[in-house]
Image (spheres, grey):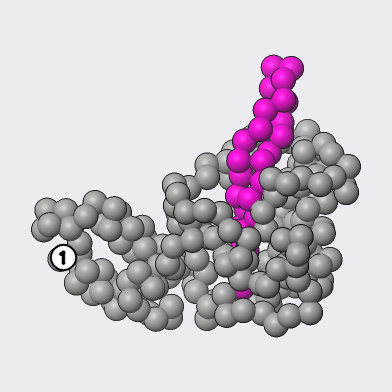
Amino acid sequence: MSEITRSPLCWPDNVARTAPDKRRWPLFYEKSIAVATSFAIEEINRLNGFRHDYLDESVIVSSNLRLRQDGLPAGSQGDPADTGVAIYFKLRFARNGKWHYRPCVLTCDKWRKVSMNIDAIARDIEAQRARQRYGCTNIEQAFRGYMAIPERCGGASWWELLGIAPSAGEEEIKERFRALAMRAHPDRGGEREEWDRLQEAYGQAMGQLTKS
């Protein structure tokens, strides 16, 4: 697995990327980078049963933003071309009277500004905490889908792997995949890892079409 970096962005390879032309403006109010980052960290602390200002060194806010000396995103900077954010942390939950810790990653690249994507992740955690308070679920259940850290992160996006524009249509995606598959398939001498990445990229590309 690639090292999880605070910058540049270390995006989980098994999580589909949002094509740049499909990123939107959210309905919620925009926060600054600093405020959105603090909100996310505070929500993770509350989720884990700590004080809001607890220093959890396992939290990694990964993006393409420049960093401060403490490793968090610096304020007063323009947005990079890729505004995606991945937040890695250890989820703390009780089971059978004992505390357990599991690695998690939450991602968002739906919005056009990094601060909005950080804010969206924080709001998602806040909503999951509310579900727990209402008795609908427990923390382990609510975050089970985020608890499988991928084997790889920080790789190329699906459109880069396929060598097409993010806005490519269905026929272009299929045609490009067929051409690449001719040499990448293990039966034709290709490497299994390359073939797996190609299949993953194709699935993500086609998945984007269904969301349109």
Q: Secondary structure at mark 1?
A: helix
Q: Residue 99 sits in which quadrant? A: top right
Left of 141 or right of it: where is 22? Answer: left
Left of 154 or right of it: where is 79? Answer: right
- Residue at the spot x=81%, y=67% of the render? 34
Amino acid, disc 1: Arg
Residue 87: give x, y in percent of width and height. 65, 55
Question: Dot 1 corresponds to which residue?
Answer: 183
Residue 83 drawn above or below residue 1: below
Q: Main secondary structure of the magenta part?
A: strand
Q: Is 189 one of the magenta-colored residues?
A: no
| Residue most extreme to the top | 96
- Front residue of 17 and 55: 55
- Residue at the spot x=84%, y=66% of the render? 35
- Residue at the spot x=12%, y=57% of the render? 189
Residue 61: give x, y in percent of width and height. 67, 58
Q: Is 103 one of the magenta-colored residues?
A: yes
Q: Residue 163 sits in which quadrant? A: bottom left
Left of 9 or right of it: where is 208? Answer: left
Residue 164: give x, y in percent of width and height. 35, 78
Q: Residue 50 sits in which quadrant? A: top right
Provide the residue span drawn in magenta. 83-110
Residue 147 drawn above or below residue 25: above
